[in-house]
Amino acid sequence: MIYSITLNPSLDYLVFLPKKPFKEINRTEREVLFPGGKGINVALVLENLGFKCKATGFCAGYTGETLLSMIKNHVSHLDFIKLKEGQTRINVKIKYLKELDINGKGPKVTEKDFKNLLSKLSNIKDGDFLVLSGSVANGLKDDTYHKILKELKGKNILTVVDTTNNLLLNSLQYHPFLIKPNLAELSSLFNAKIKTKKDIIKYAKKAQELGAKNVLVSLGSKGALLLTQEGQIMQHPSFITGMKVINSVGAGDSMVAGFIAGWLQTKDYKKAFEFSVACGGACAISENLPTKTDILNLVPIAKQFLPK
């Protein structure tokens, strides 16, 4: 089973504005409402590809109910903890000359709520995947992922961590199977200016020295770079060079889903890496998260990575 945890999910409200100067009152060209949260995105893409997932985390209020109603028919197992107070946050993504994100704070999670989550995670078995992805909820601290991994210590599970700063740093001692920083996140992790391929490799290796097994660094329009626990260093160009990027939201999550899917099907780092880049690219040129058809239209050979 693949477990994905989203501690601070959202409703993502995409607003498309006409390319004209702002006025006191502005009217949209159109708007779209999507379920949001990095762990949820990973689960949705994996389900699109034919892999069953169990998604958990926290939700609250009317917006939380709306979120669950939007994903209940698209994820095999939902086991979210419903908080007594507050509302699941709404993130506003403004599509104008550039993309502007305004992310909500979200409801407060108590220590009792967190212990409830840990209890649910006790069902994870050897061989399962666990995806810890995104920011933590209001009320939780930078050691939250550390606490989750400490609770699961001793179980033979494959952990994927996709987050930032101390949340990521504090998780490395538990040797996650995969981390996926982008260039800015890798730079922030080590408080360094990372510009060249040599720099990327240097600091990805530092992450490995701190405990990460495989480090996948997403490079936007330049593709990605992977350092494996076997000492391999791979770089792959983007599959969408020259194409129009429609929506970058979820591209990194699609990469994570693609890597998990590719690894489960092939146990081959190179193939998992290639499929990861394909999934990220397919997301970037789609308005929503990529479907199986979106990915196969972009990279027909990707069929080998999908369940039969």
Image (cartoon, helix red, strand yellow):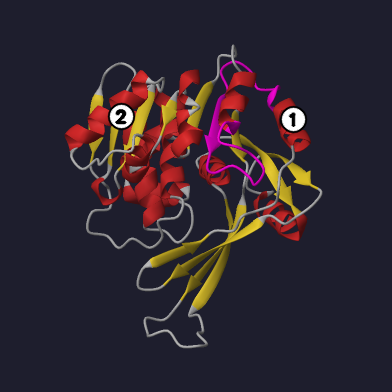
Q: Is residue 129 magenta?
A: yes
| Extreme residue in the front direction | 191
Can you identify the residue that label 2 sits on?
Answer: 204
Residue drawn at (48%, 53%) of the image: 289
Relative to 68, is 210 above or below?
above
Q: Is residue 307 visible?
A: no
Where disc 1 sits, the SS reads helix
Q: Which residues are magenta?
A: 121-144
Can you identify the residue that label 1 sits on?
Answer: 115
Q: Nearer the viewer, residue 300 or 4?
A: 4
Q: Is residue 128 magenta?
A: yes
Which of the 4 image quadrants contains residue 140? top right
For the residue marked with disc 1, what is the amino acid?
Lys
| Extreme residue in the right direction | 84
Q: Is residue 243 left or right of residue 39?
A: left
Residue drawn at (64%, 57%) of the image: 89
Residue 110, given in percent of the width and then of the height, sits at: 74, 40
Q: Nearer the viewer, residue 292 or 60?
A: 60
Q: Main secondary structure of the magenta part?
A: loop
For the residue marked with disc 2, what is the amino acid?
Ala
Residue 98, given in percent of the width and then of the height, sits at: 36, 68
Q: Is residue 185 left or right of residue 200?
A: right
Residue drawn at (51%, 76%) of the image: 30
Q: Is residue 222 left or right of residue 33?
A: left
